[in-house]
C-alpha cells in the first residue's frame, strides 16, 4: 500500500457583508459538558488559541467546576435519559467586521447576552465566556433548556426543527443589526460541531488541508481501469470531511473540484508503476519496490551533488 500527501489551498477572500454568527450544540451528557468546559476554560491544551492572549478572556463564573455546579443546580431532578442537559452557544461575527477591538465589540457581546436571556429566560443562561485568544473573538454561552411552563427540560421548544432554528438566526441578527451586522446566509449547512477547529481554519487568509491518502494494492483479477476507479473512490472517501469543509464557500467548492481532478491525475500517473507490479508475486513486488527506492535515492543524490538541490524524499 502506498500513500500520497494531498494539499488543498483555499485563498482568502473579501466579504462584502459582515454577518452575525450564531451556532448551537446540544450537550446530552455531563461528559459532553465537561469536555466543552475544559476547552472553554483552557483546562486542556487548545492548539488554535494564543496562550499569551488567554489572559484577555473573560468568564461570568470563575472555573469549569463552578459552571458545572450551576448547570446541575438548574437541572430538574426528574428528566429523560436522552434529554438535552445544556445547549452550548457560540456567538461571533465576521472576521472583517470593523467593530473588533472597539467599543462596538463590547456592545455586541452585551446585546448578545441580553438576547440569550430574553430568548431562554435569565435563569436558564447559567454562564457566558468571551474568548479573545483565538483568531476571531467570540462568546460561549451555556443554557439549560428548562421550560418554565412545565418545569421540564425541553430543548425542542427552541431548537425543534429548521423553521425554529432559522427564526432564531433572524431574531439574533435583528438584535445586533444596529452594529452593522447582517443575518448569515439562510440554508447554511455549517454546524457547531468542532466549531473551534472550523474558525481556526476559515479565519486564516490561506486555508491548507493536508492529509496522507492511502492507495489500496491492486487485485490480481482487476484490470488497470477497474483499479483506477477503486483508487479514486478510496481517496475521495478518505477526503470526504475535507471536501465537506471546502463546500462552505464558493471559492472552496471550486478548489474541491480542482482537488478531485488532481487526485484522478495523480492516480493516472501511477498506472505504469501498478502495471509493472501487476503480474509479480509478493517477493517480486518487494524486490521491485526496493529497487525503485534505491534508484530514486541515487537520482536525488546525484541531483544534490550536481545542483546543490536540497530535497526531502519520503517513500
Image (spheres, helix red, strand yellow):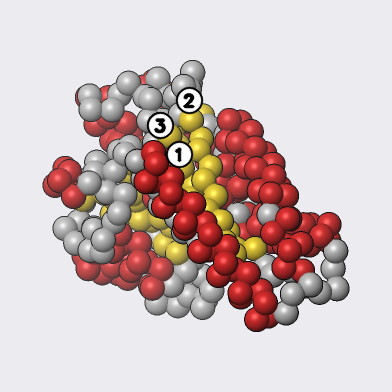
Point out the tag, 1 or 2, that comes first from the N-terminus: 2
| Residues under numbered marks 3 and 2 in contact, where contact means CB atoms less than 8 Å apart | no
Q: Which residue is mark 3?
A: 205
Question: Up-down: is 61 above or below 286?
Answer: above
- For disc 1, the neighbor class at 10 Å (few under 14, some 14 to 19, many from 20) is some
Is label 2 in a helix, a strand or a loop? loop
- For disc 2, the neighbor class at 10 Å (few under 14, some 14 to 19, many from 20) is few
Q: Is residue 114 visible?
A: no
Q: To which quarter of the image does residue 163 belong?
A: top right
Q: To which quarter of the image does residue 178 belong?
A: top left
- For disc 3, the neighbor class at 10 Å (few under 14, some 14 to 19, many from 20) is few
Residue pictured at 65% horizontal, 43% vertical: 262
Residue pictured at 47% horizontal, 56% vertical: 298
Q: Which mark is residue 207?
A: 1
In-image side of 259 versus 211 (left or right): right
Is label 1 in a helix, a strand or a loop? strand
Q: Position of residue 134 (x, y in %)?
A: 29, 43
Residue pictured at 85% horizontal, 64% vertical: 223
Residue pictured at 15% horizontal, 46% vertical: 52
Question: Up-down: is 114 above or below 74?
Answer: above
Q: Position of residue 239 (x, y in %)?
A: 60, 54
Q: Which mark is residue 13?
A: 2
Q: To which quarter of the image does residue 282 belong?
A: bottom right
Q: Position of residue 211 (x, y in %)?
A: 51, 55
**Between marks 3 and 2, how big is the CA–CA gap?**
7 Å
Q: Is residue 311 visible?
A: yes
Q: Which mark is residue 125?
A: none
In-image side of 6 versus 100 (left or right): right
Is label 3 in a helix, a strand or a loop? loop
**Between marks 1 and 2, how big is the CA–CA gap?**
11 Å
| Residues under numbered marks 1 and 2 in contact, where contact means CB atoms less than 8 Å apart | no
Amino acid at each position: 500500500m502506498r500513500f500520497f500527501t494531498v494539499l488543498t489551498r483555499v485563498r482568502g477572500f473579501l466579504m462584502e457583508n459582515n454577518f452575525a454568527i450564531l451556532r448551537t450544540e446540544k450537550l446530552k451528557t455531563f461528559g459532553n459538558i465537561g469536555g466543552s468546559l475544559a476547552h472553554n476554560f483552557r483546562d486542556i491544551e487548545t492548539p488554535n488559541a494564543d496562550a499569551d492572549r488567554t489572559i484577555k478572556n473573560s468568564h461570568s463564573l470563575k472555573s469549569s467546576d463552578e459552571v458545572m455546579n450551576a448547570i446541575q443546580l438548574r437541572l430538574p431532578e426528574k428528566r429523560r435519559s436522552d434529554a438535552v442537559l445544556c445547549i452550548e452557544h457560540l456567538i461571533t461575527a465576521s472576521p472583517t467586521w470593523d467593530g473588533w477591538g472597539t467599543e462596538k465589540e463590547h456592545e455586541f457581546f452585551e446585546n448578545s447576552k441580553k438576547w440569550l436571556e430574553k430568548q431562554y429566560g435569565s435563569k436558564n443562561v447559567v454562564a457566558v465566556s468571551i474568548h479573545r485568544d483565538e483568531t476571531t473573538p467570540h462568546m460561549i454561552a451555556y443554557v439549560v433548556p428548562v421550560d418554565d411552563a412545565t418545569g421540564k427540560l425541553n430543548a425542542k421548544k427552541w431548537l425543534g426543527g429548521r423553521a425554529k432554528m432559522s427564526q432564531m438566526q433572524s431574531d439574533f441578527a435583528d438584535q445586533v443589526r444596529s452594529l452593522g451586522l447582517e443575518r448569515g446566509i439562510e440554508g447554511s449547512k455549517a454546524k457547531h460541531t468542532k466549531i473551534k477547529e472550523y474558525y481556526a481554519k476559515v479565519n486564516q487568509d490561506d486555508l491548507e488541508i493536508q492529509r496522507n491518502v492511502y492507495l489500496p494494492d491492486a487485485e490480481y483479477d482487476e484490470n488497470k481501469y477497474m483499479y483506477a476507479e477503486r483508487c479514486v473512490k478510496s481517496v475521495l472517501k478518505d477526503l470526504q470531511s475535507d471536501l465537506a469543509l471546502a463546500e462552505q464557500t464558493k471559492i472552496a467548492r471550486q478548489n474541491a473540484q480542482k482537488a478531485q481532478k488532481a487526485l484522478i491525475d495523480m492516480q493516472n500517473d501511477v498506472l505504469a508503476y501498478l502495471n509493472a507490479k501487476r503480474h509479480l508475486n509478493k517477493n517480486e513486488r518487494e524486490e521491485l519496490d526496493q529497487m525503485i527506492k534505491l534508484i530514486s535515492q541515487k537520482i536525488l543524490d546525484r541531483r544534490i551533488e550536481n545542483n546543490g538541490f536540497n530535497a526531502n524524499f519520503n517513500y
